[in-house]
Amino acid sequence: MASLELQKITKTFGKKIALEDVSFKCKEGEMFCLLGASGAGKSTTINIISGIIPPDSGKILIGEKDFSGAFPQDRNIATAFENYALYPHMTVRENLLFPLNSPVRKKESSKAEKEERVKNVAEMLGIAELLERLPQELSGGQKQRVALGRTLVRRPNIFLLDEPISHLDAKLRHRMRSELKRIQKEFGITTLYSTPDQLEALSMADTIAVIKEGKIQQIGTPDDVYYKPCNIYVAQFLGDPPMNLFAVDYQGSYAIVDCDSPYKLPISEKDQKMLNEKMGSCQLIIGVRPRDIKFVNPDDPKALIKGVIKIVETLGQTTIVNVQVESESIKVKTYTETVPAVGSVVGMMYDLDNFYYFDRNTSLLIQ
Amino acid sequence: MTSRNIVSKIIGLIIAIGFLTIILLPIVFVAATSLKIPLEIRTSGAIFPQGGITFENWVKAFRNVPLTKYLFNSTVVAISSTLITLLIAIPTIYTVVRFKTGGAVLPSLILGTYVMPPIVVTVPIFAIVKTLELQDKLVGLILIHSMMNIPLAFWLLDSYIRNIPVELEHAAWVDGYSKFDTLVKIVYPLIKPGVLSTGVVCLIMSWNEFLFALILTYSDASKTFPIGISQYIGEHGMQFGEMSAAALAGIIPIYILVFIFSKNLVEGLGRSGLKG
């Protein structure tokens, strides 16, 4: 077990910048999530940490020691790859024994000890009865467990899990999410976990780093990144459906929404005070999460704006409603039983205390 | 089965039989000639023996020319050169494909040597072999055959290596294996069918090679089978019967080898895009 620190890692592939000044630290025993869309640089980061590709510049510290130039086999890092990377010509048992029989670990334990470890890990992951099978005879979920087992048998300093459950079906993914978290806590090994799924990150991570186009956007606890997104990208990336954004002109007690037929949004007194102190210009973007918007009768004086219901996506207990307001579409998340019919005119009331304000030029959060 | 299916099957069968006849006829002719009475070979134009079967040609073929020695030499040269070819070609193609060793130049250079007709380099090769004092020695021929076959093996193995998902190798590195260990433990087992078929092709190429064997060997101690065949052309004309017997003795081992590996060979050549 050890901490992991990246200092100003930069990597380019030809002219494309894959990573730019990426720095973060995973504390010992922590579950650290790297969250980003595909192509954001998650796999590149993981491959650089494991030593598969060398960075152009920057340092990698494992347990305070500099491993930047070390060979992959000398880093004692275990990686579970996105496509599992099980050795197709070996049985599950041989796959699990493979890291234990490597030249760097061969003499660490006796043959019986190795077999014992494989047995323990296989039992813990529920794959004990699959040990004699070949990878092509396994289902996706079973392959994923074997891949995980191969990282678990050897007690590495650090686990790197590259989108380990993104190819599983929804039900299994849900189960593996809690199971992975349990295993990680049980072993207490520092884990770096990459995923494009914000739910996975929010539910599993101790710390989340949001990455976009090779640049770290924000690092913080799940609560931090969800409730205090540092910029518009993070605010939109976390939360499903994404946050509604309104370009506005701030005018003191209210803001005028910049659209075809402008309307006013009132600003709470607390926010007015904060904005007067912190904002750089009156050109703002207001963010409102879909769940902070409530439907009211269109004639209700509390209705801030009116719109027409266009699309309704029912997700069991909750429903996502697309409301057309002039040329803009606003998403509202509400309980299914309160959804008005498609085509009807509704009034909407915003929870003024849950507005997010961003600078229109820098897209940074004003708080 | 519909009637259209039956018709297309029959047409296919006729074409296949036609091709097989063209390919097999010379071999049948050689086999029949080897069993004919010597006098009949000169007088009759018939394919099959008319005046009875005799093994006289076979006995003479082995008695008049040290054919056993030549076949033995060919075996040594073919097996050794194939092993050397594979030992050099596998790591080379692996580093070229995975680590871009030599950039774009090395692969085209290697393929370039394959495209060139061998006769072009006979003089420099003779000079080199002479300088190394390897002329008329099996070692010399083994090295030359390996050199000739490396580009071929390189080409045949290329697609096998490319077909391995690179993550498997990365996983092995992270699991504690060096790049060389990864080649041995992960890459080699996965390309084994390709290595086998490449090996068989190299073996055949070396077994049949005539040009360099002719210039580099002159004594019975180092002559190979194809050169041996030419020994039946003597002062008293061509010994067709003996030559046929010897030719058959030389191709039978290769036929057995190809038969054993036929499944591998068809699969392997099909995948490398090299057919026919």
Image (cartoon, coloured by chain):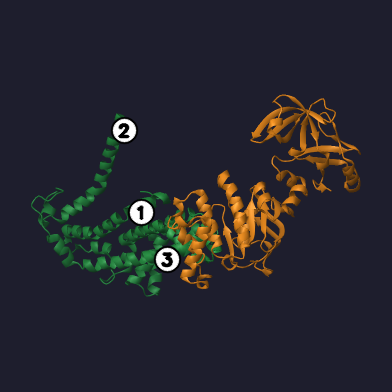
Chain colours: A orange, B green
Q: In this rendering, is residue A350 above or below A118? A: above
What amino acid is at disc 3?
Leu
Answer whether residue A47 is visible to the viewer in this image. no
Q: Residue B5 carries which label?
A: 2
Front: mark 3 or 1? 1
Q: Is mark 3 on a helix, strand or loop?
A: helix
**Residue occupying the point 58% across, 68% down:** A74
Residue in the foreground of this view, choosing between B275 and A157 = A157
Q: Which mark is residue B96?
A: none
Q: Is residue A180 left or right of residue A288?
A: left
Mark 3–mark 1 contact, CB under 8 Å?
Answer: no
**Residue occupying the point 12% across, 55% down:** B36
* Tag 3 residue: B87
What whole-number distance in Å separates the C-alpha atoms at marks 3 and 2?
48 Å
Same subunit, labels 2 and 1: the answer reads: yes
Q: Which of marks 3 and 2 is nearer the N terminus?
A: 2
